[in-house]
Image (cartoon, rainbow, N blue to C red):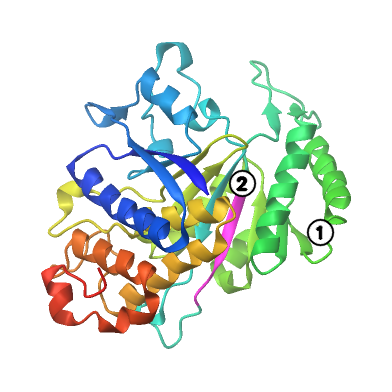
Amino acid sequence: MNLKIALLPHSEFGDLIMNQGVKCIRAIEENYNHHFTTTYLKSLEREDNYWLTDEVIKNCKKSDAILSSFPITQKNYYQNNKLKSVSLTQILDCDATVAPFLAFPQTLYKDAQDHNTPDFVIFTASKSGQYASLSEPLATTTDVYTPNIQGVHILFHLAFKTAKNRNKNLIVVTPNGPLKASLWKKTLDEVSHSYPSVKVSEMGMEEIMNTLKCKPEDLDCVFADEIMGPILQFQSKANCDMSFVLPLAHTGMGINLFEPLSLINCRSLSSDPNPISLIYGVALMLSRFGLQEEASAIQIAINSAAKRGMFSFKQQLPIEISCDQLGDYIAAAIIDADDIGELNDENIDLGKSTII
């Protein structure tokens, strides 16, 4: 497969983190006979924000995927006087946001013996319609939702496909408003017939929030609208202690953006930054394009590094492990997983591998 990938670092640490993702991309190329064209794009620093120029946006739109070393959609990184109220995901015409909360080896959890490792995704619809912005208050019975019927059908199909590729369990969160709830119910009934292997259940917001808090291990794929989804994503992020190693994806028909779930505070680091969220973003990107075996190879390599104590859920790496050492190890494990045991402690300390 040939893919064009735009790379958005943004700082010295951003370049360091991005380089580890590129190592994994090259390892996948070597092991699976793909060709990925990567292009580094620059952002402009403005006080505490980072701006993307119109030229950078144009190059992003020409790419199949965008890989960012920082959570670019979660702050006002893109500034344009003509598009002040338009988000980057709207500019890139993204249909949905996928937030995976992944399982890691038990050794990373503080209470490993009693810990149930959740493994689920929150699939948030981004283009299911619009709520009107009105200057006068409305009666409680009034519904100001304007549906995007075609968009809703596309989003339901994407959610079902996501569930089908996982453990075949889909929870649909009932949206607010009678018109929207009716449309979602009708669409669910229509689309579910195309996915007989997927088990579907419906939950209200209160029920799904309780499940997130008390029994997240029961979840697989959760589908919510643009109102409920970010709330569930925030709650899941607050409940877990691993947000610094998780990616976030924004998907569309023509472009896909992958970024870390949480921002690393580089000023507070006493060792190298943890690049796992970006590397997992590469795996998420490959999975989005149907390269499941390649994505699994990255996940297995990440888990191997975790078992060796090369990273934790913290935003920085152990003092004895550099970012380059971790990236080299994971790339080497991707290239030849059978020989991963030959990587001894001395070679890891030196940042070298007996495989490459």
Mark 1 packing: few (<14 Cα in 10 Å), some, or many (20+)?
some
The label number, if any, that marks residue 222 in the structure image: none
Please state if 319 lies on the left or on the right of 7 as rendered: left
**Between 17 and 129, which is closer to the camera in this rendering?**
17
Give the residue number, with chain letter if any, for mark 2.
124
Q: Is residue 292 above or below residue 142?
A: below
- Kind of residue sitting beneath label 2: Thr
Residue 207 can be seen, yes or no: no
Q: At which x and y percent is residue 232?
A: 56, 53
Instruction: Residue lying at the far front in this picture: please name it.
Output: 33
Q: Specify the segment rendered in magenta.
A: 117-123
Q: Residue at x 36, y 30 (%)?
A: 77
Please state if 262 lies on the left or on the right of 343 as rendered: right
Q: Residue at x 77, y 62 (%)?
A: 201
Q: Say if mark 2 contacts mark 1, CB within 8 Å.
A: no
Question: Quadrant where the C terminus lies?
Answer: bottom left
Q: Residue at x 33, y 45 (%)?
A: 69
**Between 238 and 337, which is closer to the camera in this rendering?**
337
Give the residue number, with chain letter if any, for mark 1.
195
Q: Residue at x 23, y 48 (%)?
A: 265
Q: At which x and y percent is residue 353?
A: 21, 72
The secondary structure type at the circle numbered 1 is: loop
The quadrant where residue 255 appears: top right
Q: CA distance from mark 2 to mark 1?
A: 19 Å
Q: Is residue 249 above or below residue 102?
A: above
- Kind of residue sitting beneath label 1: Tyr
Q: At which x and y percent is residue 64?
A: 51, 38
